[in-house]
Image: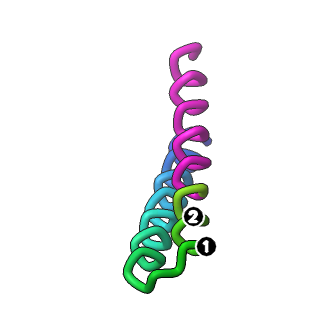
Amino acid sequence: MGFDDKLGNKAEELKGEAKERYGGATGDESTQAEGKMDKAKADLKQAGEKVKDAFK
């Protein structure tokens, strides 16, 4: 299930990036901050997956 998790995390990261850019383009600081949070959450999940892979 590792590959599926990594793919989902990457999709979440891209979604966060899109939100962040949209918020920046429209001047919506709330959406921009939400996008940054989504990206950070996805990055943490990716780091967890890498740790799991290291112990396989």
Residue 8 in which image quadrant: bottom right
| Magenta span of residues | 38-56
Residue displayed at 53% across by 80% down: 28
Task: Mark 2: give few (<14), some (14-19) or many (20+) Cα within 10 Å.
Answer: some
Residue type at mark 1 is Ser
Q: Mark 1 points at which residue?
A: 30
Image marks 1 and 2: residues in contact by CB distance under 8 Å:
yes
Which quadrant of the rendered structure holds the N terminus?
top right
Residue closer to the observer: 31 or 11 = 31
Residue displayed at 61% across by 48% down: 41
Give the secondary structure at mark 2.
Answer: helix
Residue closer to the observer: 30 or 8 = 30
Image spot of residue 43 (x, y percent): 52, 43
Give the residue furthest to the bottom.
26
Residue 33 in which image quadrant: bottom right
| Colour logic | rainbow
Q: Name the residue under label 2.
A: 33
